[in-house]
Amino acid sequence: MLLRNAEILFNDRVSSELYHMGLLCPEIAARIQPGQFLMVRVQEGFDPLLRRPFAVHRIHHNDPPTSFEMLYRVVGRGTRLLADMQAAASLNLLGPLGRGFQVPDHDGFVLMVAGGIGIAPLPHLAETLVSSGFRGPFVLWFGGKTATELVCVKHFKDLGFAVQLVTEDGSEGRQGLVTGHLEQWLSQQGELPKVMYSCGPYPMQRLVAEMAARLGIPSQLSMEALMGCGVGACLSCSLRCRPLEDGPDPHYLNVCQDGPVFAGEEIVWE
Amino acid sequence: MTNDKPVNLAVELGPLRLENPVMVASGTFGYGQEYAELVPPERLGAMVVKGISLEPRSGNPPPRIWETCGGMLNAIGLQNVGLRAFLEEKLPWLKPLLVPVIVNLFGNTVEEYGKLAAALDGQEGVAGLEINISCPNVKAGGMTFGSDPEMVFQVVSAVRSRTNLPVITKLTPNVTDITVTARAAQDAGTDILSLINTVAGMAVDVQTRQPRLANVVGGLSGPAIRPIALRMVWQVVQVSRVPVIGLGGIVSVEDALEFLLVGAKAIQVGTANFVNPRVTLEIIDGLEDYLRQQGLVDINEIIGTLEIPEQSQGADCR
């Protein structure tokens, strides 16, 4: 965990609410594992007060890596301030934080599932798999409200992913929700994935985890929560998980420190 | 005028001696390990660890946090590992640290406070106890104890009679007159008072018409509450025979100085740790700079030196 000022390399609007920010900070870049996140101070001063958590989207794979990217959606005051920032400005970062995705033990069929801005942490994982010599096959199922939410699809295709798109309004790909189509598609495949990686809204994550459990596929879910500190001190970002033997029930883990990536079977869905 | 003489930041709070007056507040610094990569615990005046109870506590369901203007509402519900796990898993890491470790403790009954105090008495690595009678987010005990002077007296007496460690009593601001509960704690034998805990508050999502916190109400912290905290510390200092630790919304050296000037012997930094994990170190350095700028050599020279202009002295804001 480092506390550093990064230089903003670019901060581009990708679609109506989505922004793509490049950050230069060699020390942090060199330490980021796929699925980890950063706590970003969106402004000097104390209003807004708290840092905001953002997934790391990609690492720029020069050697050693010196810069990385965040993909974020403007949802409130903090992200609006972030969207207004210009290249060359400085941004204070705390990170990298949390337990990220685990790379599979063996090569084989890898399925990624993303809902909306849940796509954010997956490119770094995909690049890591490919650069580590995994050959797949790789499939991404990506759902959004409308076609403009479905960003960085070409990047996944370039990495060798087969990409299945779903939109709620039918403006691109299948119409409906990812979770409404995925299981039927899986049943038509010759083999089941070795692992499912997923990031998206809580109801989607729940359906993905339940489906993975039914099919006996290990799932790794990147979860989201309102956070205070990002390091396990404030105990605000709790996620209900299976109680330990002799431990208190309900059992809450911290999304920031115990996650953000959890195995599907760890979570008690509410 | 500046000078290069070494300055003294050490303060004495009754039986507790601190190398500097900057502490971290309970519940905002975990058990020290969480921030150790950024803040060497030894540089702090003291570290108050996350409140512990006899048995582990789950805490409240999420959402537990909501940001407000200059503040943060929380309703954690005193989630903690419990006494046994604290002694077995947390204390061994804390023991060798050259910093006074204060254990914040919380009970559901007067007897539980006494049992906790007895279990922690004589534990190597524990420099003092802070009695939490002021958490607004739990149904039994907590604020019910903290707002009733008779209960404050009973809880502090139960702890006092079971330990030789320095005892700090942390007061809630959610009372009409904080000097009443301050006196009760003092009469029961507390060595030190700390104030304030969070201010009871609430926020609502107007789209869903639901409260922002699953617990409905929570405790407000952060710079939004600092003027309330400062006023209460000043009031308590007027009537207190024991040293006072000031806290509530401190985010900078200027804020810390305000509390010292009204008479706090030490300060705690809480929510600001989340925003700037190194804020305590900046405050410690800032206090040295302030003393040098003022041509002073000892932090004790400024504590309680608030100057009230003559024409204001009739003002009574209690």
Image (cartoon, coloured by chain):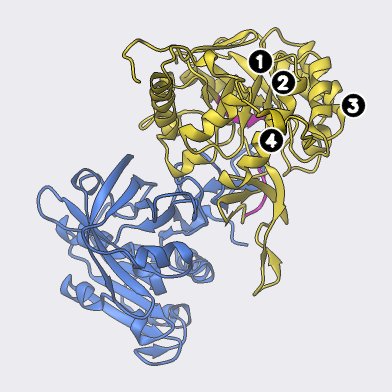
Chain colours: A blue, B yellow
Q: Are marks 1 and 2 in contact (CB under 8 Å)?
A: yes
What element does badge 4 sit on? helix
Q: Is residue A77 left or right of residue A101?
A: right
From the image, tell me which residue sits under label 1: B120
Looking at the rendered image, the disc whose residue lies closer to the viewer, 4 or 2, is 4
* Chain letter, disc 2 residue: B
Front-lying residue, B8 or A145:
B8
The span picked out in magenta is B48-62
Image quadrant occupied by the N terminus of chain A:
top left
In primary-sequence order, the first of circles 3 and 1 is 1
From the image, tell me which residue sits under label 4: B231
Q: Are marks 3 and 4 in contact (CB under 8 Å)?
A: no
Q: Indicate the amino acid at tag 2.
A: Leu
- The image shows residue B125 at horizontal and vertical percentages of 54, 13
Badge 3 and badge 4 in a common chain: yes
Q: Which mark is residue B116?
A: 2
Image quadrant occupied by the C terminus of chain A:
bottom right
Q: Indicate whether B247 appears above or below B211.
A: above
In primary-sequence order, the first of circles 3 and 4 is 3
Q: Is residue B92 left or right of residue B244?
A: left
Callout 4: few (<14), some (14-19), or many (20+) C-alpha neighbours within 10 Å? some
Give the residue at x 80% y 28%.
B179
Q: Are marks 3 and 2 in contact (CB under 8 Å)?
A: no
From the image, tell me which residue sits under label 3: B150
3D distance between C-alphas at marks 4 and 2: 32 Å
Give the residue at x 71% y 32%.
B311
* Chain letter, disc 3 residue: B
